[in-house]
Amino acid sequence: MFRPLTIRGVTLSNRIGVSPMCMYAAEEGHADGFHLAHLARFALGGAGLVIAEATAVEPRGRISPWDTGLWAGTHVDAWRPITAVIAAQGRCPGSN
């Protein structure tokens, strides 16, 4: 469980993964400080893979109006600090 694992050229530091959780905390699809704190804690705790919550590629694809999105450049920019914190811990950020 604590050995590295390589899948399709991506090496995880261990075999512990955090599965996606729907947090219903985004405003207009934008990840924010809540998402940073929520996901960073798993990376800090040592999970090798941290998968973000359900993230829609267009507004009508959301499960709820409070899901995160990737249909605008501002959504991508909102995810950058979150993925950077996860990666800085030597962990792999992922999305579903």
Image (tube, rainbow, N blue to C red):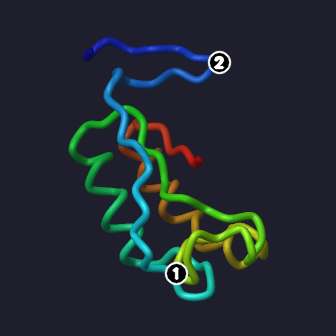
Residue that numbered label 2 is attached to: 9
Graded by Cα atoms within 10 Å as few (under 14), some (14 to 19) or many (20 or more), the crowding at tag 2 reads few
In the rendered image, the vertical position of residue 43 relative to residue 11, given as above or below: below
In the rendered image, the vertical position of residue 68 relative to residue 41, given as above or below: below
Residue 6: x and y, percent? 53, 14
Q: Quadrant of residue 12?
A: top left
In the rendered image, the vertical position of residue 96 relative to residue 65, given as above or below: above
- In the foreground, 87 or 26: 26
Q: Quadrant of residue 9?
A: top right
The structure residue drawn at horizontal position 37% and vertical position 34%, both measured from the top left corner, is 17
**Could you tell whether 13 is left or right of 10 in the image?**
left
Residue that numbered label 1 is attached to: 66
Mark in front: 2 vs 1:
1
Q: Secondary structure at mark 2?
A: loop
Quadrant housing the N terminus: top left
> Nearer the N terminus, badge 2 or badge 1?
2
Q: Are marks 2 and 1 in contact (CB under 8 Å)?
A: no
- In the foreground, 61 or 70: 61
